[in-house]
Amino acid sequence: RRCPSPRGGGPPPGAGGGAFFAGCRGYSAPTMDLFAPYSTISGSAAAYGTVFAGSAEQMVLAHGAGVPYTPETVGRYKPGDLFKSSLQLLDTFGNQIKNTDAAGAPAALPYTVRVELVDPSAAPEAAPFFTSLFKFGTDGVCNLLDTPYQLVFPTTAQPDGTLVFASGLVLRHTVVEPVNGLQLQPVEVPITREPCAVNQAFSSVLKVCVDCFPSQYIINRDGACQDCPPNGGLCNSSHLTPLQAGAVWEPVVSIGKYLLRSCPAGHMLVNSSDGDSNGIFSDEAQHCKACLPGTEYVNFPSSQSCLPCPVGGVCDGSTVSGIPGSEWQVDAEGFTRLVKCPAGHVLVRNDNPSLDQCVKCPIDRYLVDDALWDPPPGQPTLVSPSAVSAADVCLPCEEGLVCAGGNQVFQKSGWWALTPGWWALSPSQT
């Protein structure tokens, strides 16, 4: 279709190249109204010569750096990302529309791009979550990055305090020409929310991703930055590295924090502000504390207190040992308990694990069997609840014997044993 009555002079519609027509509208219109007497639209290489251009009939949207928009394109944004779309206008013949001023220098197109974040499932009268306006540059491109504007994601707080992000949103791009009222069909880009970066957290106040400090870490990027436990770890704004080799920290996504689960040998687990583990839990106070060598020990990696070394033991922080021939075992509560003393000793044990010890029989008393906490049937129980009364368990030295303490028993001169293996003696017959 040709313009029936060209304006502005020039040859008739059927004439050869070089003609310029104004005042036509419609998809097949070969020309468009000028917005000012000095305006020109250039860049066309259509059938009627290089100075010919048609009206703006098509908006081309690119999403990201040179990524063309297609109906399948999904805009991926983190909260707070700048808008990344760019737009160009094409005429009926697919040529980019640009503008120049009276001197022929490139000038911005007199269009405004309205960008709205909307929920397409909402009622038609529902207001967009936000609206922002952008302008075209002298290159004929409206680059939204030229006007930095952060995408703010709407959220809804749940009763438990967690935030739920709105989903199914679209960015609606509409070109508006305020003089003649030109408005092209909007282009909508579906929005997919991506989590914040590994060193960022979502701010429930600003509704955007914010950087964590170097002294913090982040586990749940929809949550908050957490302060690094000063005595337990080193942080780099994203992760926690244990200070103590062998310490095990577990990232708990549900609460967005690292929890100290176990410590290396010889260390107790501290997780309360009292410096021990008997007060109120504090994630910032978590660390592994070394037990004092010689006076304390700990058996389980998750133990929350160092235990006093038993009177009869030698402790290095992680193990308990005693005199040669003694044996120790760890009970269900984490205490190392005495279970065997060598012959000549009484096993002292009661409800207080710190008092466990082997007490040697004094001079003039003896024992020749090992003292067992749980002796088999037929073997004597050589156990005392107190070191003070331990000597009472030892056997008295019999006539004809010399008892030097412990299991040191000697036969007196002139005496001999009646029963092999027993210290039952009688005077020798000479």
Image: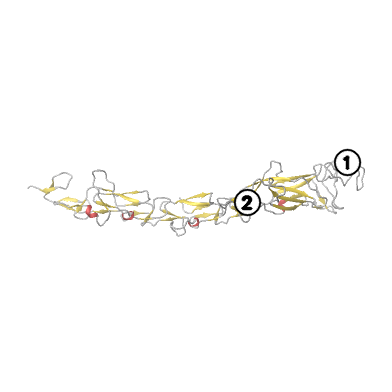
User: Residue 175: image x %, image y %?
Assistant: 77, 49
Question: What amino acid is labelled 1 in the image?
Answer: Arg
Q: Nearer the viewer, mark 2 or mark 1?
A: 2
Identify the residue under disc 1.
2
Between residues 405 and 256, which one lies in front from this camera angle?
256
225 with respect to 7 (left or right): left
Quadrant hosting residue 10:
top right
Please give the label number shown on residue 374: none
Characterize the local packing of mark 1: few (<14), some (14-19) or many (20 or more) Cα atoms within 10 angstroms: some
Q: Are marks 2 and 1 in contact (CB under 8 Å)?
A: no
> Residue 169: where, in percent of width, then height?
67, 47
* Residue that label 2 marks: 155
Q: Nearer the viewer, residue 321 or 279?
A: 279
Percent x, y of residue 349? 29, 52
Q: Nearer the viewer, residue 381 or 106?
A: 381
* Figure label count: 2
Quadrant location of the N terminus in the rendered image: top right
Does the rendering let one see residue 247?
no
Mark 1 lies on a secondary structure that is loop
